[in-house]
Image (cartoon, rainbow, N blue to C red):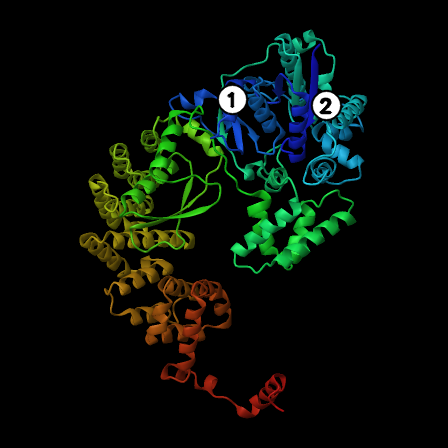
Amino acid sequence: MSHVEVYGIRHHGPGSARALRGALEEFKPDAVLIEGPPEADPIVELAGDPGMVPPVALLAYSPAASSGPGPGSGDGDRKAAFWPFAEFSPEWQAVRYALGAGVPVRFCDLPAAHQLVPGEDEEEEETGGDGGEEAAEGIRLDPLGWLAKAAGYDDAERWWDDVVEHRGGGGVPEVAPFPAIAEAMTELREQLAALPEKPSGLPPGHLRREEQREAHMRRTLRRTLKDGHERVAVVCGAWHVPAIQAKVPAAHDDRTLRGLPKAKIAMTWVPWTHGRLAGRSGYGAGVRSPGWYHHLFTARDRPIERWLTAAARVLRGEDLHVSSAHVIEAVRLAEALAALRGRPLAGLDEVTEATRAVLCEGADLPVELIQRQMVVGERLGGVPERTPMVPLQRDLQAEQRRLRLKPSALDKEQDLDLRKPTDLERSRLLHRLRLLDIDWGVPSDTGRSKGTFKETWTLAWRPEFEVELIEASAWGTTVRGATTARAKALAADATALADLTSVAERCLLADLGDALPTVMRALADRAAVDTDVAHLMSAMPALVRALRYGDVRGTSTGPLRTVVDGLVVRVCVGLPPAITGLDDDAAREFLGHVDAVHGALSLLADDDHIERWRRTLEGLVARPDALHGLVEGRLTRLLLDAGRLHDVPDRMARAVSTGVPPARAAAWVEGFLSGGALLLMHDETLLRLVDGWISGLPDDSFTDVLPLLRRTFGAYASAERRAIGEQLRRLGHAPAAASHPAEDDVDETRAAPAAATALHILGWDR
């Protein structure tokens, strides 16, 4: 006589997981069926490997992503799905029980081959019904939320915690909840059946797909019984329990599943993180507090005391004073709050309030630290070596081991010294992955050394990188080979010169000598036909950086030098006609190009190129009427810094003279002074000129140029602005200010009432 037990669980519920493990040990099934993709049956035994450390996830993907000439045309072509498992997931505990007991374990949900068909789920269900639609949607999409609402809760997760997760203390339910869950779901589905059918507002294809999933679960159960198993345990989401227990003819399920489109898919295990289990990450079956749930599952006694002790340890690690007395008082407060609210055990809300009030003394920042490190807890799982992987994944793992770069879910700062062979190889690996759009490492300028031998990276591994690696394997079987192919493709597809220079720079950073000739040919061809000086100028900084830093990495840059030499000549020839007759917006844009090229040539340190560039700038400032004031002022400043101009005070005097429109004068001053407060702090003549010009502006002109002046001086540091103000105060009675004697003389009789009022306000008249 066959005996089937259906256990309705909540995905990633620690109370459900512990109750399920106890129920299975009591029932002793000879086969276990679990909601999940059947394609995972051949690799489910890997869950028993010591190297499999949750959180992990089953990954279904299309093998076509790793066998074609290149990845799909965009994100819309990506087809992959994850089934995550944490230590506290009931499904994971069911798998581990079955493997430990030596009984068959199978997945019984609709195959992933039917769920990952391109274009599926786009067909919308017909809508209809009346006022019962809202209730129908709520029951079907969130049955636990509906039960919570009926029980007077406004939070489904809090209700479930109270009735399941926190029962019995320490998260251990006193009585197995599965019969009550099955009864509640049966009642909900009966109420749903009585409401108008096909409610609106559901996701496209939701109703049809739900029927197909439940039909396949029943079919799998029938086949398991037909294979001779007599005691079968079925573990599924609580909503599906009544459907699996229902007496539905096999012929009906066959009709439901007949003719389903099918795609070729592959299945593997990948590491997962607690952060990706959190509902805030967008995961549909996510929970708000995976770290808290992991604690409830693993702390079999005194979970509140242990949690608050761990929180105190975290705060002490940040040099915050937390004593044992704080912990004791926090435990008392959490338990008191739970009693006042009628909860069987202090939940996350209570321990968080106790943490804020007692351990953190009302401060929010320490609470956020605990939220990040403990409540969510970025735990990264691991998979065993024998897990199926595409060659690119295996090659990356080998590189990670060789270079001692261990993936972590937490942000980690990594400083690299490129003079050290290991650090140089690490840098190349991270740059290669970025060329494959896998941003495991992100370069950081914070705290970066001014030398060329230092790099600072922020490393953080995300589970979706596994999918991106699978897709990137279309380019090759090794990281270097795949990156080389991708760089060549990027060069072939680039339409802008700046894009090509960026690819060339990235090839040098990643040490892709095989790709560089192809990229350089494309770059030279594009540069030869591009006549836009702005394009040439925007391309130069990346090329110069590649030249300057290529030698540090030991990379050959000969072809690149030829392109740079040609660009410098073409920019110097084409700049004079391109930079004349500009409006305000174009002048500001060209100013950025001029500064970028000037900085790039200084970095390159080629005397011939620097001399050619300075002669070009000298020719431009020799005919100022053709230049925008912003450009003329900036070119004057660059030549002054280079020691090529000795009449700058006269030039400024002419630029801000009475006959010059205030707007042009302000633009000239902005261009001249941008990025350089030290000039005004130490050159008294120039400071007097600027001060005299501003002081002599009429009221309406001053109002017009004020935004430009504010933009210029607002960019200076506060200490620099203060120093300029002190310098102006000392110049207050100098000869340059004597041109307005009437304005400088003070009528003491007229000023006396104002002075007396000021002294009274300050309290100095007593």
Q: Position of residue 243 (x, y in %)?
A: 72, 18
Label 2 or label 1, whichever lies nearer to me, is 1
The amino acid sitting under disc 2 is: Thr
Q: Vertical placement of 659 versus 409: above or below? A: below
Choose the circle earlier in sequence order: 2 or 1: 1
In this orientation, does residue 169 appear?
Answer: yes
In this orientation, does residue 201 appear?
Answer: no
Could you tell me which residue is drawn at 34 percent across and 60 percent down?
634
Disc 2 + disc 1, Cβ < 8 Å: no
According to the image, label 2 marks what residue?
127
Q: Position of residue 484 (x, y in %)?
A: 31, 31
The C terminus - image quarter? bottom right
Of 293 and 475, nearer the camera is 293
Q: Position of residue 198 (x, y in %)?
A: 73, 22
Q: How busy is the neighbourhood of tag 1: few (under 14 within 10 Å), some, or many (20 plus)?
A: some
Q: Is residue 350 left or right of residue 469?
A: right
Could you tell me which residue is drawn at 55 percent across and 43 percent down?
377
Numbered circle sitting on residue 45? 1
